[in-house]
Amino acid sequence: MLRIGILLSGRGRGTNLQTILHACASGFIPGEVALVLSTTASAPALELARAAGVPARFVDPEGADDPAALDRELALRFGDAGVGLVALTGYLRLLGPEMLRRYPMRMMNIHPSLLPAFGGRGFYGHHVHEAVLESGTRFSGATVQFVDHEYDHGPIILQSVVPVLDDDTPLDLAARVLEQEHTLYPEAIRLFAQDRLRVEGRRVRILPEAR
């Protein structure tokens, strides 16, 4: 059973966390959410996790005595919980060397565009969808990737495409992309839990399911 850690910031509704919790409870993901950490004390996802019986903690990002202290604290807490995979669900900070050392190609992120387009520093939430609409592109989507030392840069695991409609607002597009996120993220975690992902340079190969 894979022990999953969830890392987030901001004040989103926690819908990706809810989807992962449901996928674990239903047996779709052979694992469990072992710990939820947030750098925002009022994040709704913390209460959502506690209601599901999952330990959920606030980690104060301002209490660090140096830039690497937060990174070490996160790595320590996930390590103590026996976490094998860290899933970012709206974590807006760049993870540092300690987390990358402890969890090499064992951290995932979900992004609301078809990376590498509309990714990088500053591209999150509604900023992504506004940029997509302004660009005139006809398609957007969602991407699950492994986390590395740059924003939205790690090897891509799965992607899903959605059309951009002529009368779309950022909210319309966000809702359509979020539906795909809720399918894509549990599937990527399931593949990891089944040991079916192999990173080969910048590519991720998906192995067939064992019979």
Image: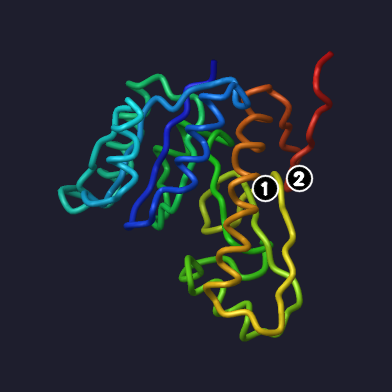
The residue lying toward the viewer, choosing from 21 and 200, is: 21
> Would residue 138 be found to the left or right of residue 87 on screen?
right
Any mark on residue 155, and which? 1
The residue lying toward the viewer, choosing from 22 and 64, is: 22
Q: CA distance from mark 2 to mark 1?
A: 6 Å
Residue 188 point in image, percent of width and height: 65, 38
Quadrant hosting residue 135: bottom right
Q: Reading the chain from its start, which is encountered first: label 2 or label 1?
A: 1
Any mark on residue 203, and which? 2
Q: Residues within 10 Å of mark 1 (few under 14, many from 20)?
A: many
Identified at 29% across, 41% down, the residue is 46
Q: Answer yes or no: do the residues labelled 2 and 1 have beta carbons within 8 Å?
A: yes
Any mark on residue 104, and which? none
> Would residue 120 be found to the left or right of residue 198 on screen?
left
> Would residue 102 be found to the left or right of residue 11 on screen?
right
Q: Residues within 10 Å of mark 2 (few under 14, many from 20)?
A: few
Whether residue 194 is situated above or below residue 115 in the rendered picture: above
User: What amino acid is at disc 1?
Assistant: Pro
Q: Secondary structure at mark 1?
A: loop
Identified at 66% across, 84% down, the residue is 167
> Would residue 38 be found to the left or right of residue 135 on screen?
left
Whether residue 203 is situated above or below residue 195 in the rendered picture: below
Residue 189 point in image, percent of width and height: 60, 33
The residue lying toward the viewer, choosing from 122 and 3, is: 3
Quadrant hosting residue 55: top left
The N terminus: image quadrant: top right
